[in-house]
Amino acid sequence: MKIILDFDDTIFNTHRLMHSISAIFKKAGFTEEEFFGAYQECKKIVGDFDPKTIIELLNKAKPFDKTKAEKEIDLILGDLEDFIYPDFFDFVKDFQKKDLILLSFATTDTQKIKIDNSGITEFFGNIIITSRDKAEDVKPILEKYKSEKCFFIDDKTMQVDNIKNKLPEIITMKIKRPQGIDITTESRLTDYTIESLDEAKNIINKLIK
């Protein structure tokens, strides 16, 4: 058995992190709308969350103390265990480290910092950070463990449907976190729609018996 888990909005509360970081810029005189506007623009430019890009975008609109903002963001990113959804720690108790794989999409170094400082790396037998189609990383896992059941858990409908379409043998779960960015989009192809990792654990345990 192999269980492949996404990071942001699956085991990590990205919404809460972004609001914690937006509070730093609020102190510098920016509104939440201005911060999240820069956040979305940042993703268009570099494809992912990148504090330095956001700082530069906001500084162009209204100069502020960039060094202070960078230090405050680094302080938050230095200890992220509180941003992990509590059900993750219950989930991993039921499974062996060798069977858990973290697969996270990223185009900047910030994602590795987030993962390294979230207190979860010790629970995974393999951690993959990729900037390509996730199916390209899932396919060799399925080929290596083709005699075993494999599960894929992600919050993003596009990712779940893409994986299920290209690799129909994998058992997929679309997780809908209350503050996730893709909570309203329904998956057409997923095997299961869940709202917590507790649900995922129960489904997996029933299927592997």
Image (spheres, rainbow, N blue to C red):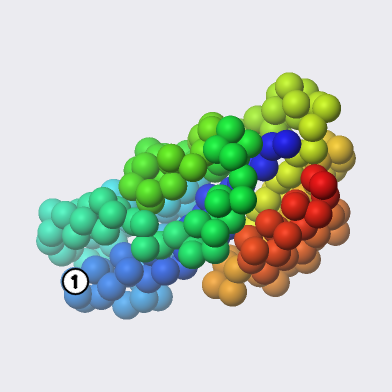
Instruction: Give residue 37's quadrant in the image.
Output: bottom left
Instruction: Between residue 125 and residue 64, name the one nearer to us.
Output: 125
Q: What is the x, y in percent for residue 161?
A: 79, 50
Name the residue rendered at 36%, 76% in the picture: 32
Q: Is residue 141 visible?
A: yes
Tell me the kind of residue under disc 1: Ala
Instruction: Between residue 69 and residue 115, name the one nearer to us.
Output: 115
120 versus 181 height, above or below = above
Name the residue rendered at 28%, 54% in the picture: 79
Q: What is the x, y in percent for residue 42?
A: 42, 53
Disc 1 residue crowd, few under 14, some 14–19, many 20+, Cα 10 Å: some
| Residue 31 appears left or right of 173 | left
Identify the element where label 1 is drawn.
loop
Instruction: Give residue 68's quadrant in the image.
Output: bottom left
Q: What is the x, y in percent for residue 90?
A: 54, 59
Q: How many marks?
A: 1
| Residue 132 appears left or right of 28 | right
Q: Return the residue at label 1.
A: 28
Q: What is the x, y in percent for residue 141?
A: 70, 28
Q: Which quadrant would the N terminus be assigned to in this image?
A: top right
Instruction: Give residue 105's quadrant in the image.
Output: top right
Name the residue rendered at 60%, 68% in the picture: 177
Q: Is residue 110 visible?
A: no
